[in-house]
Amino acid sequence: MSKKQKRWLRRILVALALFFVILVADEGGLLRSAFGATGSVYASFALYLVPYLIAGHDVLLKAGKNIVHGQVFDESFLMSVATIGAFAMVAFPEAEPHMAEGAAVMLFYQVGELFQSYAVGQSRKSIAQMMDIAPEYANIERDGELVQVDPGEVGVGTVIVIKPGERVPIDGVVVEGATQLDTAALTGESIPRHVEAGAEVISGCVNMDGLIRVRTTKPFGESTVSRILELVENASEKKARTENFITRFARWYTPAVVAAAGLLAVVPPLAGMGPWSDWILRGLTFLVVSCPCALVISVPLSFFGGIGGASRIGVLVKGSNYLETLAAVDTVVFDKTGTLTNGSFNVVAIHPEEDIDPDYVLSFAAYAEAFSDHPIALSVKEAYSGRIDQARVADVREESGHGVQAHVDEHVVLVGNDSLMAEHGAGWHDCDLTGTILHVSVDGRYVGHIVIADVVKDDAGQAIRDLHAAGVKRCVMLSGDREEVAGAVSERLGLDEFHAQLLPADKVAAVEELLEREGTRGKLAFVGDGINDAPVLTRADVGIAMGAMGSDAAIEAADVVLMDDKPSQIARAIGVARKTMRIVWQNIVFALGVKLVILVLAAVGVANMWLAVFGDVGVAIVAILNAMRAMRVR
């Protein structure tokens, strides 16, 4: 509890203690003995006013301020009118006094408000824990000594020192030392990750046992921790349709019930249907039970809890609207490379033409790919044992989805797929091996091809099985790779459908077609990791990006980010979203249902103030307790 909440609690406890002492004295006949029958009524009026004002003076002040500012109809107004009205019933001598009910309504309303405040604080705690991943400083060496500086002042390429127990402040590459990194705060993964010289590290992880030196590769503002905090901070601004509906509903609902209560209190006695005191009391009871706080707090709290719970397993959801969409997903479309496969390619075979040396094919391919950071290009350069002199390479032109053309010394080199060779009239031929085939042409002559294979992620098969078990109807893979390669991966993983040899624009078209087949009821999620996935991530109903190895553009375009790159997290994210939506609708149906019943009972004179207190505070507490379940994620 915060200091403010503790002061609030003390005030409520004092008011509750006074209230029960007065209640015992009143019901036990002490007041009547001391002040007589008439005097006891006014004595109890004055006495009950004390706990009432101790507990509810801030509610009365808030209602008054809102009226001055023209914002009349809120729960403070409802509570103030209802409780003041209960006390004012003393003006009707023929009616039973209702000061005890008036004080009790305010007291239990404050108990409910305090509980709401505590619940919201708990849900924000998970977000606050994530905020703790923000590093406060970075160590750099100056004149042989370590100096702590603001991470925002550290430039790209600076070597920073991270001691055991400290948090990695900026993304970079280890240049010296080895250690274990605790990545749980980012990925939800409890097993430490070993890193040594050459390994990439991301900010927000905790260095567990060894001193390491890291050369920064990004400024602090673009590092992983900064991007995560920005996503979380902006998440609450994107509300779900259900959340927006409740906000609009409360805006119209409150004035409507105030008007209904007024009519209930005034019209029947004017029509001669009974005494004024009876119908005014019914109107006041109607006001108490109609307070919409159970809805307006429990629905946003459920979404907030769902987003916080997802973040604890390493899934960042950018807003409750995306959580709502994720719950309705029944088709999941994957990009292959980097999503279902590791994206770490290796050269597994070189098939040169007759009288051509394999190294000749590989060297020209490596030179042509000299300036590319594509995983396939990196694997070719890694397989080439020689040093690449980039000064020998000129006029490099990448043909998206097809390959690359470059001048290497005086030679024109083409490296790419079947389409590139066909386009330039090179006499290529196919390969029986499964993998990505890079054909190589030098000065218009086909010199051979290189076979490159990717590795399927360990949990990819389980991810597909989990999605099917969760009720996802179709798991589809889109790939720019050859038909045989995509088919082999699809068969191995048990996918329902695959599309191969697609350019980035083709992937958008494929998703458009799947969306048309989807209709209006189901939703489609696309999972990708690369820059070329950004258009598809934006076009899908919900875009999911691999955060650890995905590109900045993909993460920016996505609605959900998986921090540990495991596709098996998608089924868990859908599970969290569906649980959250179940809780939201349970609260809506429960709160509206109970209130409707008590409203009817109040209108016909069956419900009293005590039942109205349950209809307001009791329902709110039950709904909030239910909403807090969204925070718990296994």
Image (cartoon, rainbow, N blue to C red):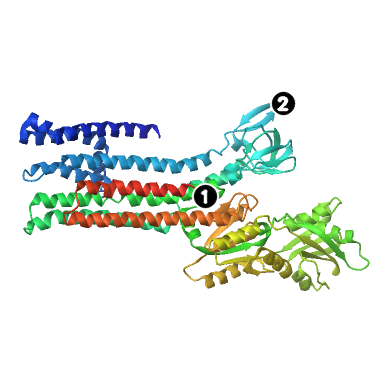
Query: Few, some or many C-alpha atoms within 10 Å of disc 1 (few <14, some 14-19, many ≥20)?
Result: many
Dot 1 corresponds to which residue?
Answer: 310
What percent of the width, then of the height, locates residue 398? 73, 62
Q: Amino acid at mark 2?
A: Gly
What percent of the width, then of the height, locates residue 347? 80, 58
Q: Secondary structure at mark 2?
A: loop
Quadrant containing the N terminus in the rendered view? top left
Q: Which mark is residue 575?
A: none
Q: Residue furthest front?
A: 28
Q: Earlier in the sequence, mark 2 or mark 1?
A: 2
Q: Residue at x 24, y 36 (%)?
A: 57
Relative to 359, say whether 53 is above or below: above
In this rendered view, identify the residue nearer to me: 119 or 555: 119
Dot 2 corresponds to which residue?
Answer: 144
Relative to 235, say whether 513 is above or below: below
Q: Amino acid at mark 1?
A: Ala
Give left or right: position of 11 versus 502: left
What percent of the width, then of the height, locates residue 93? 6, 43
In this rendered view, identify the residue nearer to me: 25 or 193: 25
In this rendered view, identify the residue nearer to me: 34 or 252: 34
Residue 407 shows up from this direction: yes
Q: Secondary structure at mark 1?
A: helix
Residue 74 shows up from this direction: no
Query: Few, some or many C-alpha atoms within 10 Å of disc 2 (few <14, some 14-19, many ≥20)?
Result: few
Give left or right: position of 291 versus 24: right
